Image (tube, rainbow, N blue to C red):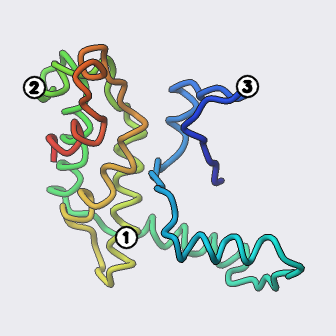
């Protein structure tokens, strides 16, 4: 499933509760399109053009690739890195990082570790590798963790973003 969220609250729209956000694998920030990209968007969506859609994957192929990702082996050090990374986000726990204690109200739960590993496996496969390494975990970490940590008042008051906090853990 893919969902979009407008950063400006509008009547009838409300932020999802943390428990619902946690079910999304990634939170990807998209900026405005470039001038050239926006021209193409406007050109292709305001005329009398009916786009021709072509299937690139069938349901069986999607299921095959999902299972393929799950079969990718992960070395213990990579698994431990992912779990340690998630543990660093949990304030006032034995493995908490200083930034978590200072700037977070709540950290990421176990689902974050699951999605870190699945995302790292996909990243590795796309890069032509047979197994993910720590760099693959780092490559997906911001998108996996940014919606799973809750900043405290101090972080918001000081303008400390979720991405800055997560980057300090990496």
Distance between mark 2 and mark 1 Cα atoms: 33 Å
Q: Which of the 4 quarters of the picture holds residue 53?
A: bottom right
Q: Nearer the viewer, mark 3 or mark 1?
A: 3
Q: Earlier in the sequence, mark 2 or mark 1?
A: 1
Q: Nearer the viewer, residue 45 or 72?
A: 45
> Percent x, y for residue 125?
37, 77
Q: Which of the 4 quarters of the picture holds residue 86?
A: top left
Q: Which of the 4 quarters of the picture holds residue 57?
A: bottom right
Answer few, some or many: residues within 10 Å of disc 3's Cα (few below 14, many 20 plus, some between 14 and 19).
few
Q: For mark 2, what is the residue?
A: 98
> Percent x, y for residue 162?
31, 36
The structure residue drawn at horizontal position 43% and vertical position 39%, both measured from the top left corner, is 111
Q: For mark 3, what is the residue?
A: 11
Task: Tell me whether the residue at label 2 lies in contact with that at label 1, contact meaning CB atoms closer than 8 angstroms.
Answer: no
User: What secondary structure is marked by label 1?
Assistant: loop
Q: Nearer the viewer, mark 2 or mark 1?
A: 2
Q: Earlier in the sequence, mark 3 or mark 1?
A: 3
The structure residue drawn at horizontal position 15% and vertical position 26%, both measured from the top left corner, is 96
Q: Which mark is residue 72?
A: 1
Task: Tell me whether the residue at label 3 lies in contact with that at label 2, contact meaning CB atoms closer than 8 angstroms.
Answer: no
Distance between mark 3 and mark 1 Cα atoms: 45 Å
Residue at the left extreme, as displayed: 98
Answer few, some or many: residues within 10 Å of disc 2's Cα (few below 14, many 20 plus, some between 14 and 19).
some
């Amino acid at each position: 499933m893919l969902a979009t969220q407008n950063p400006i609250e509008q009547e009838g729209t409300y932020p999802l509760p943390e428990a619902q956000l946690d079910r999304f694998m990634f939170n990807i920030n998209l900026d405005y399109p470039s001038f050239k990209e926006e021209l193409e968007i406007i050109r292709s969506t305001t005329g009398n053009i009916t786009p021709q859609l072509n299937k690139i994957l069938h349901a069986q192929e999607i299921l095959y690739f999902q299972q393929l990702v799950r079969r990718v082996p992960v070395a213990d050090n990579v698994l431990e890195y992912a779990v340690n990374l998630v543990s660093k986000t949990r304030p006032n726990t034995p493995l908490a990082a200083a930034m978590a204690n200072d700037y977070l109200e709540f950290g990421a739960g176990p689902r974050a570790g699951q999605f870190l590993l699945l995302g790292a496996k996909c990243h590795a496969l796309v890069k032509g590798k047979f197994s993910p390494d720590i760099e693959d975990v780092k490559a997906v970490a911001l998108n996996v963790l940014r919606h799973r940590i809750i900043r405290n008042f101090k972080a918001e008051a000081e303008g400390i973003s979720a991405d800055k906090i997560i980057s300090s853990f990496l």
